[in-house]
Image: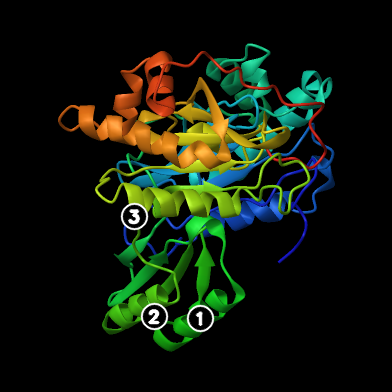
Amino acid sequence: MTTKGSCGDDTRNIIGCPLAGVDHEELLDASPILLEANRFFEGNPDFYNLPRKFKITITGCRNWCTYPEINDVGLTAIRRGAETGFSLRIAGGLSTDPHLAVRLNAFVQQHQVVPVLKGVAEIFRESEVLRENRERARLKFLFVKHRWTADTFQSELENRIGFHLDHAVPETPPDDVYRDHVGVHRQKQPGLFYVGVAVLRGRISAQQMRTAAELAAQFADNQVRTTNMQNLLIVNVPEQNVHALANGLAAAGLPVAGSPFWRGAIACSGSEFCKLAITETKSFSRWVVEELEERLPEFDQDLKLHVTGCPNSCGQHWIADIGLEGKKIKSEGRMQDAYYFCLGGAVGLHQGISRPIGYRCLASEVPDAVERLLRHYLDQRAPGENLRKFFARHSDVQLREYLAGKFVPVAERDPASGRVPHLVEG
């Protein structure tokens, strides 16, 4: 382990699937390629002092659990006949100006990965327009503010690397909502399984962690892994031990299954630990989940409910079905925690940025608002219509009325205050 790449204006820790080499469904174990790329960038002074952070993911996971759509560079395994290479996406990111990564017309062969990453990083490093304003210094702003296109970027990239990339092959992004590897799943290795645990809002106690470690030692091979969705994985579990392991985890409050609310809840650190946060998020999100489980036990759809304590979107509210962005509202003579609603975000096959619909309320009123919204969905949905399609066919005015229980005027979303601090996510 190293602190290199953990913060600052450099190449951050390169992310891969935590089940690389294990998942029965993966297209490729990308670990050797990822480690080669990491060796190239880690401690490389040529890529210090970038305009801002630079985030890369390389994965062979069919679920795209590393979220290539919101990374500066996303390489996802894809097959071309008998050959496995990578699709290439660039310039993803959230924060206050969300932008989903753009797919280039490229099939990247395995031996081309590091030269391609180097070329993208050089474009980023040498883009003087990205050094003029720290608020607009991420790679995505070449597209958002400076009118670059996929063709523009690819032409510049190929000039730098000195060869043309093969044309992209047809691709079908995953249609899975959670991408969390929760549940019991068969591994590549005969007779072995992995068990994914749904950790509510990413908060785990010391005792729960000890219990998970003890169970991993007792029923598997002593490994506990983590996921992007703030969950735990125990790998290499013999088939005869799966049931006992799952029961032991559930008894510790770490279920291998959960309600849509439990499984789909994500929260940033919030004001408890983050000086930039406006609202408390962790205890709040647990309370919201518990309220919704009690009020809507019949709710049967996959749901992503993301809570972020400020506009910088560390809780990734822009890609959630229901995204809650922390605000303050003056009520009863004092400023209180509140949340602004964004609806209909997604990644994968039906990707899109969530809609700021102009409604906010006190934190204490959020369960009521979400319950009203979801009851309208349950009562009015068309056959086979999921939540995203329901949101898409309703106007902002209608959705605000569903949330508030009455007609309400538009509440403007507050802009981020001040310049982006040096270490803030986004």
Picture coordinates of residue 66 (x, y %)? 50, 48
Residue at the spot of label 3: 259
Task: Please state which of residues 102 and 251 is positioned toward the viewer in this rendering.
Answer: 251
Farthest residue, direction left: 383
Q: Secondary structure at mark 3?
A: loop
Q: Residues within 10 Å of mark 3 (few under 14, many from 20)?
A: some
- How far is the residue under mark 2 from the one under mark 3? 19 Å
Residue drawn at x 28%, y 77% is: 191
Mark with earlier residue (1, 3): 1
Residue at the spot of label 1: 211
Relative placement, left or right, of 173 versus 221 is: left
Quarter placement of the C terminus: top right
Q: Secondary structure at mark 1?
A: helix
Q: Look at discs 1 and 3 and give the one toward the viewer.
A: 3
Residue 87: quarter of image: top left
Farthest residue, direction bottom: 218
Residue 23: quarter of image: bottom left
Task: Find out whether the residues at labels 1 and 2 contact each other: C-beta distance under 8 Å.
Answer: yes
Amino acid type, callout 2: Gly
Is residue 65 in sight in this rendering? no
Residue at the spot of label 2: 248
Relative placement, left or right, of 27 versus 412 is: left
Amino acid type, callout 3: Ser
Picture coordinates of residue 425 (x, y %)? 70, 40
Residue drawn at x 65%, y 47% is: 280
Residue drawn at x 71%, y 66% is: 1
Task: Find out whether the residues at labels 1 and 3 contact each other: C-beta distance under 8 Å.
Answer: no
